[in-house]
Image: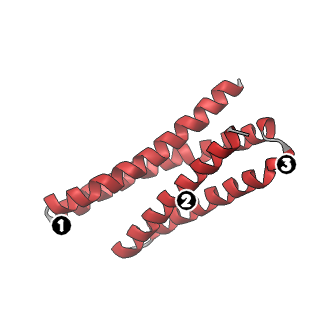
Amino acid sequence: MWTTIRFLHVLSAIAWVGVQLTLFALFPVLRAQLEPDRFRSVARAAGMRLGLVAAVTLPLLLATGLALASHEVPSSERGWVDAKLLLWALVLGAFAGHALTASRQRRLWLSALMLALSLCAVLVGTYLTER
């Protein structure tokens, strides 16, 4: 059972971070190649897909992460679990802010923040697995 939970946690992290990295790599190219209206249409569709990925992966990351922490993380490392929960909450906040803002510049900064926070969560998770 714990192998399945660990697998779901890692798969969710891969999907969430992978989609963010893909969009960061593709959007500058698409912006340069497409007319502004066409780019906005493509970006909006990609954003909706990211929303679907988030709707599945973020709750799954929370549930599987809490389960793994309660089973595998010693009490001396609970501060790292708390840090990871804080990162998760900040990612969720940045995601919500990104969805609600109309400013292109703010969306870009919030996207970069989401990616940076997500990568920090991966780093903390990697640390916890090596303990």
Residue under label 2: 117
Name the spot of residue 62 as percent of width and height, x first.
Answer: 66, 47
Q: Is residue 37 left or right of residue 107?
A: left
Mark-to-mark CA distance, 1 and 2 = 29 Å
Which image quadrant for residue 35? bottom left
Determine whether 102 is above or below 25 in the image: below
Residue under label 3: 76
Circle 1 packing at 10 Å, graded few (<14), some (14-19), many (20+), is: few
Residue type at mark 2 is: Leu
For the question of whether residue 62 can be seen, the reply is no
Mark-to-mark CA distance, 1 and 3 = 52 Å
Question: Between disc 1 and disc 3, whose residue precedes?
Answer: 1
Residue under label 1: 36
Name the spot of residue 29 as percent of width and height, x first.
Answer: 21, 57
Question: Between disc 3 and disc 2, whose residue precedes?
Answer: 3
Q: Residue at x 73, y 51 (%)?
A: 81
